[in-house]
Structure formats: structure tokens, C-alpha cells
Amino acid sequence: MPHVPTEVDVYEVFAQTGAGSPLNHVGSIVAPRREAAWHLAKETYGRRDNLSRLWVVRRTDMIVSSAGDRELLAAKTRMPHRQPGFPTARRRDRHAADEREAAGEREAAGERGAAGERGADGLGAGGALSGLWMALADDLFVLGNRLGGRIVDYIDLEESLAVGSIGQEALAHAETVLALHGFDEAAVDAHFFERPRERWRVSRAVGLLGDWPSTVACGLVIAAAVTVLAGEQAADEPAIAAIRDEQRVHLDHWRRWARALAAWPETREEFGRAYAEVTRGAGDLFGAGPQGVEAGAGRAVELHGRLAALVSDRGGPGSCLPPLPVPRAAGMGGSVLADCLARGRLVREHYAPEVFL
């Protein structure tokens, strides 16, 4: 983990040799005082070159990585889905065995992995919050899929980039949830791409992902729900802490849009209707416990109350979230879920294996 060095009299020196060049670390010095350290650095590292800037920092004022942080710093371990060769590698893995014959085995393997207990409130199948996580993973997957189509809407270029990033992270968070339940990569793919539509339990709010006002409303309530649930386990699971922090950023993004759409006279009425409908449907976001909402009613009500506080943020439109959570139902999602699954399966089944090379 990152640490604070202990050498009190050691200073690190950063220098810039030209207006267009970067500020680089050039070395270290030992000095008894701060002012003396700067002058010593000037004489040591600037006697042959003209310096544009000179920064001298006491080593104990820095937070630096340790040798064991290499995996944490490697982009390929933190965000493998963002690496250029990732689609090709995954496609080759899938074609190593017959996809159709392996699908049932993958699903079973994922469910067997999910059966491992991780404590009373863990992410494993025995955990009290497991059903909520698995249901929210479905919501995140569909939201990420739909936001992918928004990248080319060009509300403006910056928003297109932001929506793309939010969509990508929603998909990554859905995968992380399944991985924490014991699913391997093949089982994750089978869970999202091979599972029959009638076995999905998306929120009623997800079925309303249509125009931009409803997309903003859906993005807000899903980000709020994931933030609330992740807050329950962030202290015990670093991956969940990362999901919580990123979903907080997503929540702030959708809140800014909600306030803007609620403030503009041209969109106020339309967005008010969309937000009311979406928040009314979002009453089932915490209605999917291990055996339905009744199994963990007290916990679900508590989480639902926190959700209500987030979606009723002042400055936005009025929320119609029900006072208590309602159970989720299988087979919801309508044309939104159907289109999401159809497009994903089309890509997997009909694109040539070398398309990403």
C-alpha cells in the first residue's frame, strides 16, 4: 500500500528545463533546512542548464507507492476491459470450446461459485444482500447497454464522452458484482448473454429507459441505489468501495442534469412527468431479497429510506418513490430489455472472430 517515507532530511527535486518541457524528477538531496534544500538543488541540478522551474519537496511530505503496489498501478489489472486487445482475447477464449454446449455448464459453474458463503452479510448466496446485488447487476447491465447508444446522440461532445464512461463503468460494475459471487469470466458472459429473458428481474424503472429525460431519471435512481447498497459493505470489500465511489460520481452527474431539465421552461413539464414515472417504478430497486422482499423486509425498508433521501434531492423534480419497497417481478423490462439482449446476442453470434484484430 502507499506509504510515507521516513527520511526526514531527504528532499526530492523536480526541474523544468524549458517552457515546453515537462517538470521531471531529477534526483534527491540531503539538507538540514527547507530553504537550504532549494538552493542546494539549484546548484546541484541547475549548474549546466537554464531552469524554468525548480520544485523541492521533503520526502516525508509525499505519499509514494510501494513495491507491492505494482498490480494496483497496472491498468491491465484494474481496467482490463479498456485495453485494446481485450475484445480479441475474450473472443478467442469463447471460441476455444463450443459456445452452445458450454453455456449450461457455465451457468451452473457460476451458480455453484455463488453458493460459497462470505459471512452473514457477504456477497455470497448466503448473504442477506446477495439478491439485491444480483438484481442491481441486471439493472446496471441494461443501463450500460442503453447508454452505449447515447454516445453518438451528440447532445454535446463532452456529454457523449461522459455518457460513454458511465455506461462502460456500469457494465464493469455489473461484472464485478458477479465476480464477487464466484462467477468466472465465461460464467459472467453466459449469465448476461445466454440467460432467457424471462429469468431477468430488472427494475420496473429500467423498462422506462427511452428518451433523454427518462434516461437521466433512470441513471439517477440506479446510481443512487447502487451507492446505498455499496455503502453497506464498502469497509469490508475494496471492490465494493470502488463501485460506491464511482457511482457517487455518476449520481452527481445525473443530479446536475435533473436540476437543469427541471429548471428549463422548455423541459420542466416533460422531465417532471418522466421523473415521476421512473421514481414510481424504482420502488422495486430494493425489493429483490434472497427469497423476495419479505425475507429481509426490515433491511430492505432501511435501504429504501436511504434511496428516497437521495432521489428526493432538493433542486430537482418531485419524487414519486413509494413509501415502502415493492417486490421485483421476473420478465419485466419490456422492449428495453428485449432490445438489449437481442443486440448483444447478435454481436456475439454473427461477428467474425477476427473482427477486432
Image: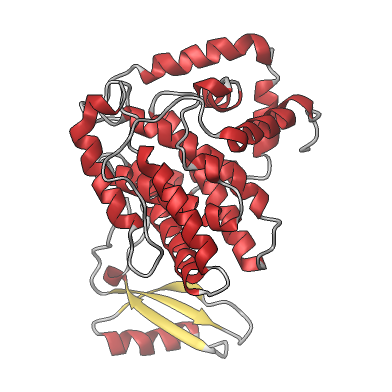
Give the camera-side residue of 135 and 7: 135
For residue 18, what is the image quadrant? bottom right
Q: Residue at the spot x=52%, y=74% of the render?
A: 264
Q: Looking at this rendering, what residue extends furthest in the left direction? A: 298
Exactly how many numbered labels are in the figure?
0
Q: Residue at the spot x=41%, y=63% of the render?
A: 317
Image x and y of residue 212, in percent: 59, 57
- Is residue 354 toward the left or the right of residue 142 in the image? right
Give the camera-side residue of 189 and 204: 204
Q: What coloring was used for the rendering?
A: secondary structure
Residue 76: tell me if it is visible. Answer: no
- Is residue 226 toward the left or the right of residue 195 in the image? left
Tell me the quadrant of the picture where the C terminus can be found: top right
In the image, is residue 12 above or below residue 108?
below
Give the camera-side residue of 274 and 295: 274
For residue 230, what is the image quadrant? top left
In the image, is residue 133 above or below residue 220?
above
- Is residue 31 toward the left or the right of residue 83 in the image? left
Residue 241: tell me if it is visible. Answer: yes
Image x and y of residue 46, in percent: 50, 87
- Is residue 243 toward the left or the right of residue 31 in the image? right
Image x and y of residue 99, in percent: 67, 16
In the image, is residue 205 above or below residue 44?
above
Q: Residue at the spot x=48%, y=50% of the render?
A: 218
Image x and y of residue 128, in percent: 25, 28
